[in-house]
Amino acid sequence: MKRILLLFSLISMLSCQTSHDCSYQAPVDLSDGLTVSTLEAHHFNVSLFDSINKDICEGKYGNIHDLLIIADNDLVVEQYYNGRDKDQLHFLASNTKSFNAVLTGIAIAQGKIKDVNQKMSDYFPEFEAIEKDSLKRLITIQHLLTMTSGFKWDELSLPFDDPDNMGVRTDQSDNWLNASLSLNMDTMPGTEYVYCGPNSIILGEIIKRSTGQDIAQFAEENLFKPLNIDKYDWFSKNGIYETGGGLKLKPRDIAKYGLLHLNKGKWNGAEIVPADWIEQTFDPFIEIRHPFYSCYQWQMVKTESGYNSWFIPGNGGQIIDIIPALNLVIVINADNRNIPKNERTPLEYLVKDIEKLFTVSENR
């Protein structure tokens, strides 16, 4: 009898948990710098969100861990799925790359980096591989930020777990910086977009050499503390930080980071990053493929509703999406790395569905 009662108790607990996970939960005020509100208070269509939320719970978009939405500077959606919660650090994957851009802007504002036209070679005089290559000597900080360095690179043609993938081979190197700077050149810097993780590794080392602090220390002092981010993890190997994908933050802190960009570098009225740097960051530099453009470690695309959207895609389904015209920040974290694309609806459709929710409510 005790076993039967225990079984019924367990089923009841699981049922409550499922119900909790799949119903809209108003965000809680944690006094962490984020103001909270509800969809109802902003006159958004809750039934439309409930439909999206139901699809997430039923696995339509794969293994979603969390969804946070900031509208009109208020956190109005904070949902966690599949056993995740607000206190767990989440892997940002390539969302990490954008931190190179914001920290470069802070370093420039502090006078520690001259400007984006400064040559990469200025920071690595000891590397003969740069000195001997006339094209490599032309690479600037801007080229690294926009993925137009000209390095010969391809990390997308082969699966990320394939040992022949260039990204995998570089990750296995004992010295990421040396492996990155030793890459062969393929095109004239500034002329062609190629998604290349080593650009971010090099940027992280430039920040270290220009500021005298490793990128984690510089970020903690100049970005994390001002945003009231007190917990993070940043993977490093032999003294080199994985600035292409090694950062972990709590979901609410990721949302703060997105809101900082939406508000042009200001956080609760204080300037953390110069507004002109945020504008420069979001300025389309080169076309990736129509209608996507490369900015400073971000990408820009026009939504189906005609709004400019700046976003960062991360492996496994990590997304930070900013739509200034709607005063909107969307944060999605997931683990879809092992789910075949033909067995799930791409996360892009989830973002589109969320955008539609707020587009429909725009004239509320």
Image (spheres, helix red, strand yellow):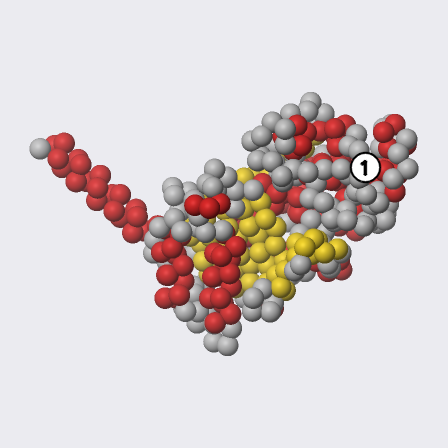
Q: Dot 1 corresponds to which residue?
A: 185
Residue 312, image x, y percentages: 61, 50
Asked whether 350 or 246 is in front, the reply is 350
Position in image of residue 230 (x %, y %) = 57, 42
Say whether residue 150 is visible: yes
Q: Nearer the viewer, residue 352 or 256?
A: 352
The front one of 190 and 209 is 190
Location of residue 198 by image quarter: top right
x then y, percent, for residue 175: 72, 25
Say above or below: 1 vs 105: above
Q: Is residue 137 left or right of residue 205?
A: right
> Dot 1 surroundings within 10 Å: few (below 14), some, or many (20 or more)?
some
Observer-nearest of 212 and 68: 68
Amino acid type indicated by mark 1: Met
Figure quadrant of the N terminus: top left
* Farthest left residue in view: 1
Name the image quarter holding residue 189. Answer: top right
Q: Residue at the location (88% across, 27% down)?
A: 128
Query: In the picture provided, is 156 more to the left or to the right than 51?
Result: right
Task: Classify residue 341 as left or right of residue 53.
Answer: right
Q: Which residue shows up at 46% across the image and 41% down it?
A: 339
Write the residue at 13% across / 37% down. Answer: 5
- At mark 1, the secondary structure is loop
Q: Residue at x 51, y 61 (%)?
A: 352
